[in-house]
Amino acid sequence: MHVELLVIGFGKAGKTLAGAFGNQGRSVAMVEQSDQMYGGTCINIGCVPTKALVHDAASRRDSDDPAAFYEAAITRKTELTDLLRGKNYAMLDTVDAVTVITGRARFTGPDQVEVTGGADSLTITADHIIVNTGAVPVIPDVPGLADSRFLRTSTSLIATRALPKQLVVIGGGPIGLELASVYRGFGSEVTVLQRDTFFAREDDDVAEAATAVLRESGITLVEHADVTEVVDADGSTSVHFTTQGGAQTVTADALLVASGRRPATDDLGLAEAGIDTDERGGIVVDDHLRSSNGKVFAVGDVNGGRAVHLHLVRRPPDRVGRTHRGGSAYDAGPGGHAQHDVHHASAEPSRPQ
């Protein structure tokens, strides 16, 4: 299969570019590894579901049963994300020039990827390729942590239908503190372990006020906490850590790791395509978001979060995707409108689940 534009990852930037090019009649393939991620992080596991939970947690009354109230909130959150995911999928699937393929993409050459899913595989070549695979959580190298049965990421925690009784959060950044506040609102006992101070990048008065609000809500905040070991038992896990006051332990039935994210480039085969990466695995790009392979661009968190220039998104519709030097970054002629049927497993494999 050959297309003018191949997009790997159904995130905000990728879906916008795919739609723009497809609506111009240019042939586009959109590859997404999970049918639960159509539309990207924000609507599925980020901004939208967490803000829905923020709203519901804040509306819980003392008379509401915590476990039942939480389960109902998770149901509402799931219904919302299911709705938005379907709408995002339809936005591209209804464009004749765009083929949406669910599977795992890996570069096998400078302009070629192999997409696999189950027993199906498909080779795609493209004039230009956009990598939009986002980021994944960082799991610290702490003995017992990665193998703990109680380990949760932000994604898996908000998919859990049983309310944790005791939630321990490793990491006091925006994600960790937001979810700490949410779960405290639902009724969990919450402890947050932070390696340095909370809100270290904020002005002192702002940091003091925000910390006070969290503590007044009943959240235990521990600063200068260095987690040394995680030990599972039958129904809980023990998190061992040291502070300036010595060694301590806290138990939990859910352990959220929120200690940062890194670019999602594992097993993309970037070296096969001549694409350079930095020390965190992010794709190195220039001011036009072009990688060391001139045919491949990287957008969003996969390049370390380097932002596109504002004037790129303010161009008139017929100039979408052009560089600020005035030339087209995708200098191929208009494509046809033939729609590829991804339900056939021979030439075009069915959407692998």
Image (cartoon, grey):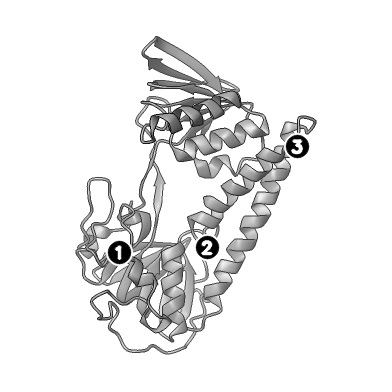
Q: Is residue 252 visible?
A: yes
Q: CA distance from mark 2 to mark 3?
A: 29 Å
Q: Secondary structure at mark 2?
A: loop
In the drawing, what numbered circle is on residue 68? 3
Disc 1 target residue = 107
Q: Is residue 148 visible?
A: no
Disc 2 target residue = 38
Q: Residue at x 32, y 57 (%)?
A: 268
The mark that comes first in sequence, 1 or 2, is 2
Q: CA distance from mark 1 to mark 2?
A: 21 Å
Residue 92, x across and y down, in percent: 52, 74
Q: Secondary structure at mark 3?
A: helix
Observer-side mark, 1 or 2, equals 2
Q: Residues within 10 Å of mark 3 (few under 14, many from 20)?
A: some
Q: Residues within 10 Å of mark 1 (few under 14, many from 20)?
A: many
Residue 46, x across and y down, in percent: 52, 50
In the image as oriented, which residue stretches furthest toward the front?
205
* Dot 1 amino acid type: Phe
The mark that comes first in sequence, 2 or 3, is 2
Residue 248 horizontal side relative to residue 325, left or right: right
In the image as oriented, which residue stretches furthest toward the right?
63
Is 346 rendered above or below residue 235?
below
Is 203 rendered above or below residue 34?
above
Quadrant where the image shows the C terminus: bottom right
